Image: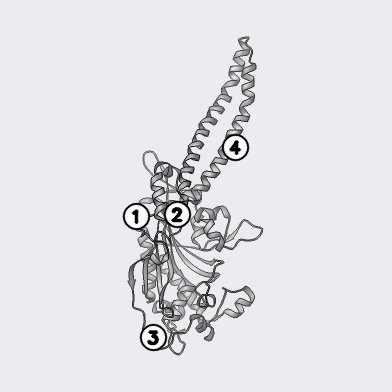
Amino acid sequence: MLDIRFVRASPDAVKADLKKRNDTEKLAWVDELLKKDARSRELKGETDVLRQRRNTIAREINAARKAGQDPAALMAEAASLPQKIKECDTEQEENAATIRSYLMRLPNILHESVPFGKDDTENVEIKRVGTPRDFDFEIRNHGQLATDMGWADFERATKISGAGFYFLKGSLVLLDLALQRYALDLLAKKGYIPVIPPYMINRASYEGVTDLGDFEKVMYKIDGNDAYLIATSEHPIGAMYQDEIFEEKDLPLRLAGISPCFRREIGAHGLDTKGLFRVHQFTKVEQFVFCKPEDSWKIHEELLANAEEIFQNLGLPYHVVNICTGDIGNVAAKKYDIEVWMPREKAYKEVVSCSNCTSYQAVRLNIKVRDKSEFELKQHIHTLNSTAIATSRVMRAILENFQEADGRVMVPPVLRPYMNDLEYL
């Protein structure tokens, strides 16, 4: 969320950003937030005065008695102070809850390079890599191909778990594991520490890393428990250092999370519902970085370069898009997507999301860095995240881009050492 000190100092910047996002209904929130903030500071002053008065009035009562004066008026005032303090505290608590509610729902401030646009049709392509293959036969749907070749079973998974689940079998299991290990090895060589996070986290931690108002509809809640299945390892890793202070020497901290991801939404048409592209459960390797604010924009480009290297080495055609103001969501200040060419649809489809969240998550989670200056100031860190590889989507891309007329599928050379040198699935 935004730091209240920033909103207080720069309300016009917050409003300008909301207009850029075409989120004008929240403009009134900024004014209301500032009123509540002003009242909160007034209440603090009033409460401080009342508490100070409570500490001094007892001495005045004793002095009056010693001087032979009637302390009745002072005693009446003393008796009224606890109720007045309680009323101020109650209003302050209500005020603080309202302020936090507004702050939690106001979006991050966008970077100046984010293009203006109303929806995903206006995202801006900034790079195209690789040439789509020219097929001389009819490409098979990846889901049907995987079924025909005995690499997946969607029907029996639907029978026991419902639509959007799958059994992987044989060579496709090896491919899934090879993609995970390849991405982890590439990142480890670049200084990223592999992390397997908990697969469930509580609501307070989840609210620290994402906008639950938008995200809760796609998450699985555990009945009777304060726990959600994670939608990505970004979320538990982001919350890992909640309420902690980093030392400058420990940043940037580069992590590579690996986990299953659980999401309630799936595709609405056959290509997605009987296949691997949009599913309820999939495995993902995620890049996550905690860093000093002055380093985050350079690291954002680093994360994108890492993801691009993976897809270049796999030999999959892709392009990179700069996500526009109408499609970016609340948390990121800037986001790139990598979209891979899917030959059956003759379209690019998202496989990587790469975001600089600046201090937005860190303010929610109260994560700071100690500045080793003369005064040892503390400021909120920046957090960044990017998909390295979501294996189900990449397996679809491999099955479609590298299939042969006889049903065989070429294994990208970089994955063969992880698959016992298998050249074809």
> Where is 122 relative to 34, above or below?
below
Asked which secondary structure carries label 3, the reply is loop
Name the residue beneath numbered marker 1.
Answer: 112
| Three-letter residue code for mark 3 | Phe
Name the residue beneath numbered marker 4.
Answer: 90
Asked if marks 2 and 3 touch (Cβ < 8 Å), the reply is no
Mark 1 or mark 2: whose residue is earlier in sequence: 2
Asked which secondary structure carries label 4, the reply is helix
In three-dimensional space, the C-alpha distance between marks 4 and 2, rounded to whole angstroms, equals: 32 Å
| Three-letter residue code for mark 4 | Thr
| Three-letter residue code for mark 2 | Asp
Point out residue 134 in the picture as x, y percentages from the top left corner.
Answer: 36, 84
Few, some or many residues within 10 Å of mark 2 (<14, 14–19, 20+): some
Q: Say how many tags the image has.
A: 4
Point out residue 130 in the picture as x, y percentages from the top left corner.
Answer: 34, 76
**Residue at left offset 38%, top offset 85%:** 135
Name the residue beneath numbered marker 3.
Answer: 135
Asked which secondary structure carries label 2, the reply is loop
